[in-house]
Amino acid sequence: MCRHALPCGLSRQNRLAPIFGNVLRVAVKQPSLGFERTILSPTTAITDEFLPATQNELSRRMAENAQGPARPIYTVGGRTVVHFGLPLIQPGISLCTTNLARVIDYPARDMTITVEAGIRMEELAKVLAAERQRLPIDVSQSHRATLGGVAATNASGSRRFGLGTMRDYVIGVSAVDATGRTFKSGGRVVKNVAGYDLCKMLVGSRGTLAVMTQFTIKLRPVPESTTILWTTFDRFGMVDQALERLTTSAARPVALDLLDARAAVAVAADAGLDLPCHRPVLCIGVEGTARETAWQIETLKNELMAIGPRELLPVSDADATKMWFALAEFQVPSDSPLTFQANLLPSRTVEFVDAAERAGCTLQAHAGSGIVVGHLPDAITTDGLAAEILTRLRGVARQSRGNLIVVDCDAGWKKSLPLWGDPEPGWPLMQRLKRQLDPENLLNPHLSFE
């Protein structure tokens, strides 16, 4: 049984081949280009790998490439999201940032830190823990994930509801554009409003606009206590009632995660906790002093009791830490044939999860933020079957002012699935920005949509 409580199918290594796996060459019709292109495997597409030790070294190499062969540059850090995007069709250079991992400045009393982009999230957490501080972003595979990769994807997890995303914490950034020019935005103080806020633009750009090399981020103190209220319900309709009640709660949850029964089984097992999990589960997370969390949990129990939950079980402190990690790791594509992410109005999240659960998906929803991560069942063995489910679910998301993208799938399916979802009104502006900052489309061209 695989980690997401689904029968295992294609191996993880085979499905990650589009970026760093075995040789794979498939002729693919690219509709937007109108002619045949050849998908290259990483071993074919990556003709050189570069691991700069300094920003100057990176800048020099980028300039040489831009003025010379102008090969595509595929930026990687911990290689945790290499499965995302279109297959590679152009031979290029792998730019790995993991040697850029120094702590530049850490004035702990100011609750900020300046570090290079290649530092692993687990290592950063250790540095901050020594001062009882943290960057409160739930990141999967933190032993591999780098700060630059987390920023490039604007990663977040369960606690984004109360604590925000990476974009909320970056206050300064240094970067190198496709021609080798270095530039900075923001600074090392929290109150910095001079000029254009390029930090917000670069965070979440997936390395398509520039290579981020250094960050100044603001921090939060480590809470004295953290508790997750594991709340089970007989049906999704009751979860909707509970979420509506929580909008006026006297408590201040930092997380509202909804799990279907399959996901609940997987998360509880991953956390090593014996919890009831054969029905929908709402995980309500709170943080603060021990007294504050105890009061919030009792308040939440009293507020939810009228709705009729089946169980209300607090998971606290060390066990809560295990649960946070398990909730974060659920987002990692495993042996399921396809992983998707939907965004929609928070008020319509339960409706979407109900529809996806009936389609056999295993689901985690950040219900307070309208973000849903789903894994298709192993019974989906063709791109046609996958497209059928995704079309239905994307329709539900679009009706809820959202969209649905494919995070990971079999390499051979990518040519026939709308990986980026339906076109959005903001796409032309994003494409124009890409052409202005990277006119030769050298930076991560496989992540640029047409």
Image: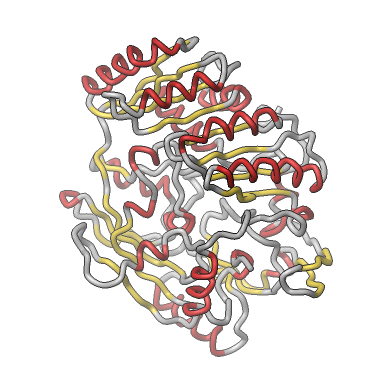
Q: Residue at x 44, y 69 (%)?
A: 53
x then y, percent, for residue 43? 72, 65
| Pick the front one: 397 or 284 | 397
Do we see residue 274 in this rendering?
no
x then y, percent, for residue 446? 63, 66
Question: Up-down: is 421 above or below 125?
Answer: below
What number of labels is visible?
Answer: 0
Question: Up-down: is 305 above or below 172?
Answer: above
Q: Residue at x 39, y 48 (%)?
A: 165
- Which of the 4 image quadrants contains residue 234? top right
Q: Residue at x 62, y 49 (%)?
A: 407
x then y, percent, for residue 292? 23, 23
- Which of the 4 image quadrants contains residue 213? bottom left
| Pick the front one: 297 or 288 | 297
Question: Up-down: is 50 above or below 165?
Answer: below
Left or right: 148 as drawn, with respect to 335: left
Left or right: 340 as drawn, with respect to 146: right
x then y, percent, for residue 424? 56, 59
Indicate the quadrant containing the C terminus: top left, top right, bottom left or bottom right. bottom right
Do we see residue 292 in this rendering?
yes
Q: Residue at x 79, y 55 (%)?
A: 412
